[in-house]
């Protein structure tokens, strides 16, 4: 596998340590509410309905801040995946997949890496992207096949995934940038 590449939609040090601590405390205090993922036994997730103005203010403020950074515009929360936090233990990985659009929308997600023992590198169309704890990246979830490599070592990899269904024109503009990036990094890897 080639070395992880800088992705045009990665925001380095997007969140402070206090945010990562908040999410990890949320995981620990709700561990019994996490569901297993049918796509892998070492993967667990918890959907959240409370990333809202009336819910968890820390999560909501960060979701809005990241949406503004990427200029997502008006959005709808994906009704199925919503916002969620997940963790993956040793040997687990996210399988290659895309996520569904709502009619007249593009499904994008902003993921924030909260903890990582080793491995579990995000892949965009099988290309590894460089992220560290505290980084956020825009995932063009309905247009780009995404996955991760397996977790290596003890502990768990955790990430929070904020969901947005955005206007198609904005999603398609992101996708064109992604396609140009893919051409460049495939050329470097050849």
Image (cartoon, rainbow, N blue to C red):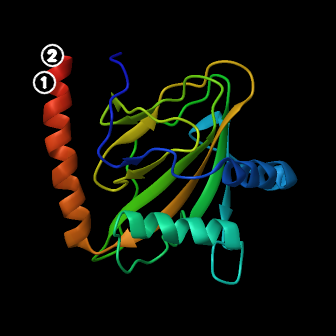
The quarter holding residue 49 reads: bottom right
Side (left or right) of 11 relative to 143? right
Residue name at image x 14 percent, y 43 percent: 180
- Which residue, given by chain and number where applicable, does mark 1 sit on? 187
Split into 4 quadrants, where in the image is the N terminus?
A: top left
Residue name at image x 63 percent, y 32 percent: 116
Give how far across and how far down residue 157 sits, in percent: 64, 35
Q: Is residue 187 visible?
A: yes
Classify 10 Å Cα crowding around label 1: few (below 14), some (14-19), many (20 and above). few
Residue name at image x 64 percent, y 82 percent: 53
Q: Is residue 96 visible?
A: no
Name the element at disc 1: helix
Give how far across and how far down residue 126 sits, in percent: 33, 30
Split into 4 quadrants, where in the image is the C terminus?
A: top left
Give how far across and how far down residue 124 sits, in percent: 34, 38
Q: Tags 1 and 2 in contact by the CB under 8 Å rule?
A: yes
- Which residue, given by chain and number where applicable, does mark 2 sit on? 190
Tell me how far mark 1 sits from mark 2, CA to CA: 5 Å
Classify 10 Å Cα crowding around label 2: few (below 14), some (14-19), many (20 and above). few
Give how far across and how far down residue 50 sits, in percent: 69, 74
Name the element at disc 2: loop
Seen as rendered, the residue at the extreme bottom is: 54
Q: Is residue 153 above or below residue 17?
A: above
Question: Total of numbered circles in the picture?
Answer: 2
The quarter holding residue 51 reads: bottom right
């Amino acid at each position: 596998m080639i070395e992880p590449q800088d992705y045009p939609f990665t925001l380095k040090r997007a969140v402070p340590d206090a945010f990562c601590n908040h999410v990890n405390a949320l995981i620990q205090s709700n561990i019994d509410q996490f569901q297993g993922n049918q796509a892998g036994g070492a993967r667990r997730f918890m959907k959240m309905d409370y990333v809202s103005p009336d819910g968890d203010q820390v999560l909501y403020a960060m979701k809005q801040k990241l949406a503004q950074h990427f200029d997502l515009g008006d959005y709808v929360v994906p009704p199925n995946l919503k916002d969620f936090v997940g963790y993956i233990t040793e040997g687990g990985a996210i399988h290659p997949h895309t996520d569904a659009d709502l009619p007249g929308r593009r499904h994008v997600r902003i993921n924030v890496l909260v903890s990582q023992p080793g491995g579990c590198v995000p892949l965009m169309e099988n290309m590894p992207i460089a992220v560290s704890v505290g980084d956020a990246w825009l995932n063009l979830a309905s247009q780009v096949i995404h996955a991760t490599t397996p977790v290596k070592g003890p502990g768990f990899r955790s990430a929070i995934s904020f969901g947005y269904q955005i206007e198609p024109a904005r999603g398609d503009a992101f996708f064109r940038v992604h396609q140009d990036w893919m051409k460049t990094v495939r050329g470097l890897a050849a």
